[in-house]
Image: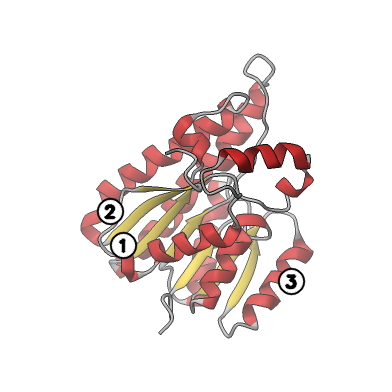
Amino acid sequence: MKLLEGKTAIVTGASRGIGKGIAKVFAEQGANIAFTYSSSVEAAKELENELNTLGVKAKGYQSNAASFDEAQQLASNVVEEFGSIDILVNNAGITKDNLLMRITEEDFDKVIEVNLKSVFNMTKAVQRTMLKQRKGSIINMSSVVGVKGNAGQTNYAASKAGIIGFSKSVALELGSRNIRSNVVAPGFIETEMTAKLDEEIVKGWRAAIPLKRGGTPEDIANVCVFLASDMSAYVTGQTLNVDGGMLT
């Protein structure tokens, strides 16, 4: 029996990296996948085809999670197309790193809007459906940076810490309706983005991690499967650090 058999999941920002890893592992576990992407039309098409070959229903939606109206529209399209929304993974995110003295107001606002307001937008958009079903699992992607902070990332850290507070509040509000809300805080995960970094810097990062390696998108996806499935039926309001021991 697959852990997510017959469930429908929305995964935001899934055309690459962690989001793509989550979409694939969820599909392997039997979930139907509605995923969003912002601009990578070709990558989205490829992913859609790949997921469909796994024998589940999958569809990509070009949607800006930072837009309240587009989030509402997306949720209603998914219910129409798939019939339910059992899992929401808020994964869409960006960085615009700089020291506080150099960061612009625009770069601060943009990161808060895409990373944090999108979580509000999407949670609000799926809430009605989940309340009607009297079940649902919401998984929000934070970061070790949201837990401990990081120089040069005040905007990103604020957005990711905000996600933790938001998720705990949602867990308290919706728990009586059997809707769970949890956070995953990834550490150093090796994706297309990190592949562009200087190899020596990456080696230094790996050496500082107790497990002596960077994580993979699958490492994050497997924890998300647990939180999305009925195996975690009594887990809500929690933040799981998936970081190879970085915050130990």
- The three-letter amino acid code for the residue at tag 2 is Leu
Q: Secondary structure at mark 1?
A: helix
Q: Secondary structure at mark 2?
A: helix
Q: Nearer the viewer, mark 3 or mark 1?
A: 3
Which class describes the residues within 10 Å of circle 1: few (<14), some (14-19), or many (20+)? some
Q: Is residue 53 above or below residue 163?
A: below
Estimate the spatial distance between the alpha carbons at disc 3 and disc 1, rounded to whole Å. 33 Å
Q: Earlier in the sequence, mark 1 or mark 2?
A: 1
**Residue corresponding to mark 2:** 174
Count the marks: 3
Locate residue 216, reporting x and y percent: 60, 57
Q: Nearer the viewer, residue 101 or 244?
A: 244
Q: Are marks 1 and 2 in contact (CB under 8 Å)?
A: yes
- Farthest left residue in view: 176
Which class describes the residues within 10 Å of circle 3: few (<14), some (14-19), or many (20+)? few
Q: Which mark is residue 131?
A: 1
Locate residue 228, reporting x and y percent: 40, 65
Q: Nearer the viewer, residue 61 or 7?
A: 7
- The three-letter amino acid code for the residue at tag 3 is Glu
Q: Is residue 172 above or below residue 25?
A: above
Image quarter where the C terminus lies is top left
Q: Nearer the viewer, residue 186 or 38?
A: 186
Q: Secondary structure at mark 3?
A: helix
Image quarter where the N terminus lies is bottom left
Locate residue 132, reporting x and y percent: 31, 67
- The three-letter amino acid code for the residue at tag 1 is Leu
